[in-house]
């Protein structure tokens, strides 16, 4: 009975690790696609009818919770993605579409959400801890880029590292097991510290 129980528990923890690894691959893939598409607010609608439009742009920094590990449930990241379509045939019906993305905590689960979808786009469960490392991308007068740790008002972009620690739910063997994941992203808008990130 002891050996049977032990083998069952070992199988259970192995299955958990496989499920979380598969979940993490999907999660990081969706995060990379949508986070690296971040833009300022680009609104071409006001330029419809113009044969030579300029794209009006308003700053939309990526809003980042400074201490996501201790944050309550809710958003810990928020960013804007604007897509524009030029129509150079009369009547020059240029258009813009806007989508707000967020990364939200819900208990021990992280969810990637979109304003255009009622359901989370991706999720990852059994999060024990999460942290962000933020660096600002600065461009000088010679058009050369440099990296500066932390948040900068002069930033033109952001390097964001997301670090996650997963642990099995209660009742699993190897309760001390910790699985770390981390990914780095280049975001084409400036960073902004916000304890309640939203748009």
Image (cartoon, rainbow, N blue to C red):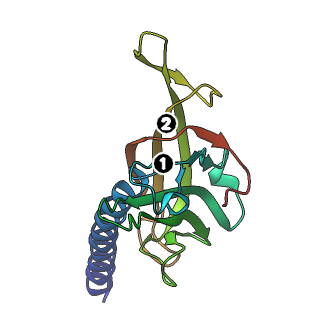
The spot of residue 9 in percent (x, y) is 34, 79
Instruction: Give the residue at x 31% y 59%.
Output: 88
Quadrant assignment for the N terminus: bottom left
Q: Residues within 10 Å of mark 2 (few under 14, many from 20)?
A: many
Task: Locate residue 85: give its quadrant.
Answer: bottom left
- Secondary structure beneath disc 2? strand
Report whether 104 appears left or right of 6.
Answer: right
Sequence order check, earlier mark of 2 and 1: 1
For residue 173, above or below residue 48: below
Q: Nearer the viewer, residue 70 or 49?
A: 49
Q: Nearer the viewer, residue 123 or 175?
A: 123
Q: Nearer the viewer, residue 39 or 51?
A: 51
Marks 2 and 1, how far apart in space? Answer: 22 Å
The spot of residue 13 in percent (x, y) is 33, 73
Residue named by callout 1: 55
Residue named by callout 2: 158
Instruction: Give the residue at x 46% y 71%.
Output: 125
Q: Residues within 10 Å of mark 1 (few under 14, many from 20)?
A: some
Report whether 67 appears left or right of 4.
Answer: right
Task: Locate residue 121: give its quadrant.
Answer: bottom left
Instruction: Give the residue at x 26% y 71%.
Output: 18
Q: Which mark is residue 119?
A: none
The spot of residue 46 in percent (x, y) is 55, 60
Q: Nearer the viewer, residue 46 or 172?
A: 46
For residue 1, above or below residue 16: below
Report whether 62 appears left or right of 143.
Answer: right
């Amino acid at each position: 009975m002891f050996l049977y129980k032990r083998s069952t528990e070992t199988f259970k923890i192995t299955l958990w690790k496989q499920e979380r690894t598969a979940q993490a691959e999907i999660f990081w893939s969706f995060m990379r696609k949508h986070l690296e598409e971040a833009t300022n607010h680009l609104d071409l609608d006001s330029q419809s009818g113009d044969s030579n439009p300029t794209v009006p742009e308003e700053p939309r920094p990526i809003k980042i919770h400074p201490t996501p590990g201790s944050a309550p449930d809710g958003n810990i990241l928020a960013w804007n993605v604007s897509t524009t379509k030029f129509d150079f045939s009369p009547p020059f019906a240029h258009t813009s579409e806007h989508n707000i993305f967020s990364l939200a905590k819900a208990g021990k689960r992280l969810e990637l959400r979109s304003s255009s979808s009622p359901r989370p786009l991706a999720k990852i469960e059994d999060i024990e801890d999460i942290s962000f490392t933020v660096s600002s991308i600065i461009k000088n007068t010679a058009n050369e880029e440099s990296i500066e740790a932390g948040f900068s008002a002069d930033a033109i972009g952001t390097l964001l590292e997301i670090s996650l620690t997963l642990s099995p739910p209660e009742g699993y063997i190897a309760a001390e097991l910790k699985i770390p994941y981390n990914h780095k992203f280049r975001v084409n808008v400036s960073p902004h510290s916000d304890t309640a990130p939203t748009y």
